[in-house]
Amino acid sequence: MIILETHLPDLKLIEPAVFGDHRGFFMESYNEKTYQKHGIMQTFIQDNHSLSVEAGVLRGLHYQLHPQAQTKLVRCTAGSIYDVVVDIRKGSPTYGQWQGFILSAANKRQLLVPQGFAHGFCTLVPNCEVMYKVDALYSPDHDRGIAWNDPTLGIDWPTSAPILSDKDTKHPMLTDAEHNFIYKG
Ligand SMILES: Cc1cn([C@H]2C[C@H](O)[C@@H](COP(=O)(O)OP(=O)(O)O[C@H]3O[C@@H](C)C(=O)[C@@H](O)[C@H]3O)O2)c(=O)[nH]c1=O
């Protein structure tokens, strides 16, 4: 397993070890001891799985407030997505900056999205399945979002006319969004 550093502090891109043979492949998608050896100390307590049927489905940008803030370990197990995170930690040297990554069933890359980041993705092909572990339970009362098309963020999404949930059409811009994350350095 290899950890690739990113432009945003604490955000990690992970390339798991994949053992291919004539049958296909085997990989550990999570191993507590191995991940802890690489500094990923979170205790994951919920697994999520979504299917997006069409290309151009955009889910995001989402986060949960403290005390239900979530670290997410995200991967794409079918198809290919453009996965985007935005640093919304007050005092962070990269506050308001975003970075995007292609996660796919083929590249098997995982993104460790720390607490204090808004997260979203856009599907690049039909029938994308995304699976992710989180270290705090889902809490609708703490669930928040930022507009995917906030012009101050300027995210370069693969489409300008995505397929959205009703909820995702109504999020505020970052400057108006409620967020209570502090960058700890
Ligand atoms: C996120 C979530 C949703 N739900 C329910 C609420 C709702 O009825 C239905 C669909 O929820 P949503 O529309 O919020 O699903 P979705 O838009 O896929 O939300 C997800 O988007 C990505 C980008 C993330 O980062 C995730 O943390 C999560 O926010 O599933 C749960 O029961 N548990 C959960 O953990």
Image (cartoon, rainbow, N blue to C red):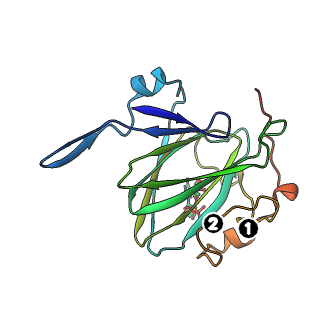
Please say if 146 is above or below 125.
above
Label 2 belongs to which residue?
A: 157
SS under mark 1 = loop
Furthest residue in direction bottom, as rendered: 161
SS under mark 2 = loop
Is the residue marked by circle 2 packed among few (<14), some (14-19), or many (20+) residues within 10 Å? some
Q: Position of residue 111 (x, y in %)?
A: 52, 44
Q: Where is residue 8 in the image (x, y as percent from the top left)?
A: 67, 40
Residue 44 tag number: none
User: What whole-number distance in Å separates the C-alpha atoms at marks 2 and 1?
Assistant: 9 Å
Q: In which quarter of the image is ligand 1?
A: bottom right
Residue under the point 56% across and 56% down: 83
Between marks 2 and 1 in the image, the one whose residue lies nearer the viewer: 2
State which quarter of the image contains the N terminus: top left
> Which amino acid, mark 2?
Trp
Residue under the point 47% across and 38% down: 14
Q: In the image shown, does 136 or 169 lie closer to the viewer?
A: 169
Q: Earlier in the sequence, mark 2 or mark 1?
A: 1
> Which amino acid, mark 1?
Asn
Residue under the point 59% across and 64% down: 59
Please say if 29 is above or below 49.
above
Residue 149 tag number: 1
Marks 2 and 1: CB-CB under 8 Å?
yes
Q: Residue 68 is drawn in which quadrant?
A: top right
